[in-house]
Image (tube, rainbow, N blue to C red):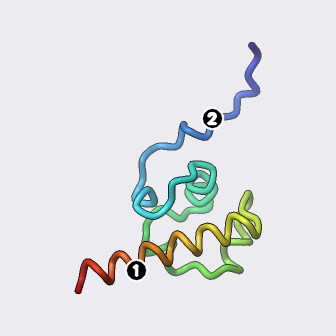
Amino acid sequence: MKTSGRRACTDVPPSELDRILSCSHTKRCLLKAGVTTVQQLLALSADDLLQIRGIGPVIAKDVLQAREQYLQLERQEEA
């Protein structure tokens, strides 16, 4: 079987983004764009996400939803 040299989606190294995101494709796109921390991810707008190569409207929406869920859990833990 011939491979194209591309990494499989499961080949993304662990990162702080694992606290929010489960999709390795999305994490890989963010990491390539220099987004390596939760704080950096929280600072991105929907337009910022759409400027990242490999992230389209559907993935951006998923990221924003995952981010909101993360923030809700953080608020609950603080209470």
Graded by Cα atoms within 10 Å as few (under 14), some (14 to 19) or many (20 or more), the crowding at tag 1 reads: few
Q: Are marks 1 and 2 in contact (CB under 8 Å)?
A: no
From the image, tell me which residue sits under label 2. 8
Q: Say which of 32 and 70 sits in front.
A: 70
Q: Amino acid at mark 1?
A: Gln
Q: Position of residue 41 (x, y in %)?
A: 51, 72
Disc 1 on helix, strand or loop?
helix
Residue drawn 73% across the image and 71% down it: 51
Residue 33's label in the rendered image is none
Q: Position of residue 27 (x, y in %)?
A: 56, 55
From the image, tell me which residue sits under label 1. 72
Residue drawn 63% across the image and 56% down it: 29
Residue drawn 73% across the image and 22% down it: 3
Q: Is residue 34 above or below residue 71?
A: above
Quadrant, the N terminus? top right
Q: Is residue 68 left or right of residue 50?
A: left
Which residue, as the protein is rendered here, is positioned at the far bottom? 79
